[in-house]
Image (cartoon, helix red, strand yellow):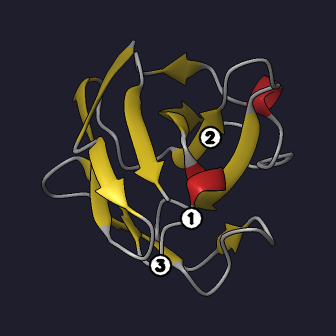
Amino acid sequence: QVQLVESGGGLVKAGGSLRLSCAASGRTFSPYYVGWFRQAPGKEREFVATISWSSEWINYADSVKGRFTITRDNAKNTVDLRMNSLKPEDTAVYYCAASSKGFGMRSPGSYEYWGQGTQVTVSS
């Protein structure tokens, strides 16, 4: 089992920045792909970014490419999501998730473990 806890959410004005962090406990974090997803009220959970265990493979949703950066520190068992130039449409609950599958990383169904989520609200 891998337990995931997100932190760093909050309220920010449009154009501002936030850094979300996902901390893992339980089994070692390093073999897993880690992804960030978000879910706005009334909408389906959508892919944001994902990173392989070695950080060699990183993928972003088109809506956040160039604004968000995902990084990981396996020694600290953490994965961060740096979000810049935030827009009101980025408002959502953000979740981190871990996957041992290594394929279909843009799909929520490919991830076995999920955190509880952290709220990000971007005001206009």
**Based on the displayed image, in which of its 4 quarters is residue 60 positioned?**
bottom right
Most foreground residue, 79 or 100? 79
Please give left or right for residue 47 compared with residue 90 in the image. right
**For mark 1, does the 10 Å Cα neighbourhood hold few (<14), some (14 to 19), or many (20 or more) residues?**
some
Residue 8: x %, y % from top left: 22, 45
Residue 56: x %, y % from top left: 56, 80
User: Which one is earlier in the sequence, the residue at label 2 or at label 3?
Assistant: 2
**Residue at 39 percent of width and 12 percent of height:** 1
Residue 46: x %, y % from top left: 76, 39
**Residue at 82 percent of width and 25 percent of height:** 44
The reply to whether the C-beta atoms of the residues labelled 3 and 1 are less than 8 Å apart is yes
**Residue at 54 percent of width and 80 percent of height:** 67
**Based on the displayed image, in which of its 4 quarters is residue 64 positioned?**
bottom right
| SS class, disc 3 | loop
Which amino acid, by three-letter code, is at mark 1?
A: Lys
In the displayed orientation, state which residue is furthest to the bottom.
66
Q: Foreground mark, 2 or 3?
A: 3
**For mark 2, does the 10 Å Cα neighbourhood hold few (<14), some (14 to 19), or many (20 or more) residues?**
many
| SS class, disc 2 | strand
Most foreground residue, 105 or 60? 60
Q: State the residue position of label 1.
A: 87
Which amino acid, by three-letter code, is at mark 3?
A: Ser
Q: State the residue position of label 3.
A: 85
Q: Is residue 99 visible?
A: yes
**For mark 3, does the 10 Å Cα neighbourhood hold few (<14), some (14 to 19), or many (20 or more) residues?**
some
Which amino acid, by three-letter code, is at mark 2?
A: Phe
Decide: is 19 above or below 24: below
Query: Which mark, by number, is residue 37?
Result: 2
| SS class, disc 1 | loop
